């Protein structure tokens, strides 16, 4: 299946956008389906870090473990779900605009269903993410632009 891809420009530096976007403490502030997120590892975020995220999927709350598979501040990061019936694969990329004063954020997701997840992906997950991803990017933009420099 094709990835769901969205892009937005943010009036903050790539460093500011990256730091906010990858911080698990901020996920519920800008991701509509994220209800709670907590790091499972000690120390700073990086490749191999794991985060337990509870999301609303349809009418259910579903805990899932996400693992960081790429961490290249302030340019890109990849995260994937490592458990549950639906495996999400996320890629975020930030490119500098206007000499680094602004940023272009691109987010891309695709999914693989296992067991019941094979039915959930086309019926629930993809439609929800298609609606949510542009709103998430808008929330990210608003949250980061509100931060005190």
Image (spheres, helix red, strand yellow):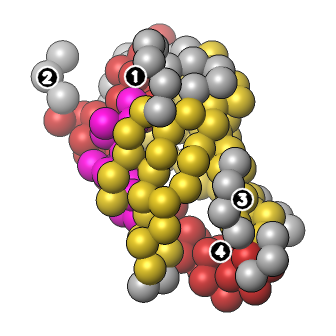
Label 2 CA crowd tier, 10 Å (few <14, some 14–19, many 20+) = few
Q: Nearer the viewer, residue 127 or 37?
A: 37
Q: Are marks 3 and 2 in contact (CB under 8 Å)?
A: no
Distance from disc 1 to disc 3, alpha carbons, whole Å, reads: 25 Å
Whether residue 75 is visible, yes or no, is: no
State the residue at coordinates (58%, 71%). 130
Q: Nearer the viewer, mark 3 or mark 4?
A: 3
Circle 1 SS class: helix
Mark earlier in primary sequence (3, 4): 3
Label 4 CA crowd tier, 10 Å (few <14, some 14–19, many 20+) = some
Whether residue 72 is visible, yes or no, is: yes
The residue indicated by pointer 4 is 126
State the residue at coordinates (44%, 79%). 60
Distance from disc 3 to disc 2, alpha carbons, whole Å, reads: 36 Å
State the residue at coordinates (65%, 24%). 48
Question: What span is colored magenta in the figure?
Answer: 23-34
76 magenta-colored:
no
The residue indicated by pointer 1 is 19
Distance from disc 3 to disc 4, alpha carbons, whole Å, reads: 12 Å
Q: Is residue 68 left or right of residue 32?
A: right
Q: Nearer the viewer, residue 43 or 107?
A: 43
Q: Is residue 19 above or below residue 127?
A: above
Q: Which mark is residue 87?
A: 3
Numbered disc total: 4
State the residue at coordinates (63%, 31%). 68
The residue indicated by pointer 2 is 148
Q: Are marks 2 and 4 in contact (CB under 8 Å)?
A: no
Q: Nearer the viewer, mark 1 or mark 3?
A: 3
28 magenta-colored:
yes
Q: Are marks 3 and 4 in contact (CB under 8 Å)?
A: no
Mark earlier in primary sequence (2, 4): 4
């Amino acid at each position: 299946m094709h990835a769901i891809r969205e892009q937005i420009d943010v009036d903050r530096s790539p460093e500011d956008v990256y730091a906010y976007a990858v911080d698990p403490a901020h996920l519920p502030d800008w991701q509509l389906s994220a209800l709670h997120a907590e790091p499972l590892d000690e120390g700073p975020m990086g490749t191999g870090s794991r985060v337990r995220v509870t999301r609303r999927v349809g009418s259910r709350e579903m805990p899932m473990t996400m693992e960081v598979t790429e961490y290249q501040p302030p340019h890109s990061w990849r995260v994937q779900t490592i458990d549950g019936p639906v495996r999400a694969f996320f890629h975020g990329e930030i490119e500098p605009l206007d000499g680094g004063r602004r940023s272009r954020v691109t987010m891309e997701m695709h999914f693989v269903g296992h067991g019941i997840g094979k039915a959930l992906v086309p019926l629930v997950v993809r439609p929800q993410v298609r609606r949510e991803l542009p709103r998430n990017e808008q929330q990210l933009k608003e949250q980061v632009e509100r931060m005190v420099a």
